[in-house]
Amino acid sequence: MDFAHTADNIFAVILSVLETYDITHRILSITLDNASANTKSIALFTERNIPQAGGYFFHQRCACHIINLVVQSGLKKVSNRIERIRDAISWIGSSNPRFQEFGRHCTLNGLRPRRFQTDMPVRWNSTYLMLKNCLEYDTTISGFYNMKLAESGCPPAQSLTPDDWEDDLLGDAVVAMETKFKKYWSEMPFLYALGVIVDPRIKLAGLEYLLEFTGNKLSIDYSEQITDIRNKLFEVFSIYERRFGGIHTEPSPEPDRQPLPTSWSILKRRKKDKSASSSSSTTRSAASSGAELNRFLEAQFDADENTENFDLLLWWKTYSYRYPVLSHLARDILVIPVSTVSSEQAFSTSGRIIEPRRNCLTPEMVEVLICIRDWEHARKRMQNETVDEQFIQNFSNLYVDEGSASNQVQN
């Protein structure tokens, strides 16, 4: 969008795309970040009666954006110290003569001369990488920086101190992060709850235990939310039952029966009698309809610690004949993205493909290159990798004796 990101404009742009592809009546969910205009635009879609499945899943707030806000709230508590370290390494690397002198200072202290990359607000793990790569050089950085400040007549208050490299303020940071976390997630999003419930290793009884466990850790009372989640679950199922209740599917070849795996150690610790009574009470207290849902919730599945080969979508495909309606619901909710990271990465990828040396690529060829890259990552199960090795290398491989690129001034 090259114009103002108002709610009306956001709504108009998204709606135009939906109408172009004639999918306005098929939209189950839209995932956005937490900008207020985005939230207001959702109301405009609701007014047009566009949300499907009762609108229970229509608006999803980007989970990664929320996590970033949580982390940033903690970083603010130590921002003064981080800022002093950031200013120091940025100043050291801002001119070649100054950095060459710092390199000699490193050699005198038995360290390899190197540069340091500064962090960026939109990549909060970059702050961790910046500090991680500076720690080995803390006294060398402080000594050189403070010496130069004194030579230029700067006040001692600007100097780096040993306290700037310590972690005694992490307690305040954790409190700030917990407060921010509760602001957004003290009420569990319904989609997240359903994602847990349709996992046959956990289901509704497991969700109740997990919420109780989390609530005890964060001093949050989830009891009313559990009741609300239970009621919404049966309401959503009734919507799907009306639509898919008459559909019958052929049994898929069942795999050799083996225990359903789980790595949720806290679930393993819960008492069996608590699990059984919870499951029984939750299903019987719900609406009288939804026999298929009740059957799933009451079914007993074994569990062990081996999780590597368990495929949740494959499980629902295999047992769709047993749970024909619930399998449609599971399929829909399990594919809803809870983050905008993937789409943002697609735009970043296109920016790396369309660059000065490739400025004559046709739109079709750009689409081909992006799709092939995405499909190749999907084949290797690399689409959702959280570790960006290249990004990490950008912070760590900055020794001046490892190539001419390291000798260039960092802007």
Image (tube, rainbow, N blue to C red):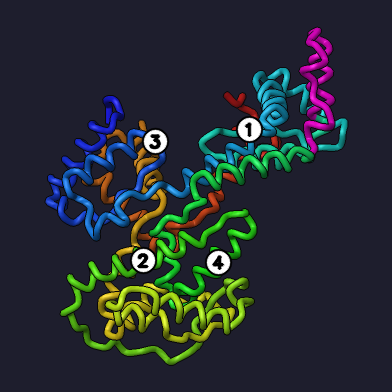
Closer to us: 379 or 300: 300
Residue 231's disc is 2
Q: Which disc number belongs to residue 51?
A: none
Q: Residue at x 28, y 70 (%)?
A: 237
Q: Residue at x 39, y 62 (%)?
A: 378
Task: Look at discs 2 and 4 and give the one toward the viewer.
Answer: 2
Residue placed under numbered mark 3 in the picture: 35
Closer to us: 78 or 369: 78
Circle 1 — which element?
helix
On residue 210, the disc is 4
- Label 2 vs label 1, nearer the camera: 2
Q: Nearer the viewer, mark 4 or mark 1?
A: 4
Is 359 situated above or below 261? above
* Residue position for label 1: 76
Image side of residue 317 versus residue 110, left or right: left
| Quadrant housing the C terminus | top right
Amino acid type of the residue tagged 4 in the rendering: Leu
Disc 2 from disc 3: Cα separation: 30 Å
Kind of residue indicated by mark 2: Asn
Q: Earlier in the sequence, mark 2 or mark 4?
A: 4
- Name the dominant secondary structure of the magenta segment: helix
> Is disc 2 placed on a helix, strand or loop?
helix
Instruction: Indicate whether residue 108 is drawn in magenta.
Output: no
Q: Quadrant of the N terminus?
A: top left
Tell me which amino acid carries mark 1: Lys
Upstream in sequence: badge 3 or badge 1 = 3
| Front position among marks 3 and 4 | 4
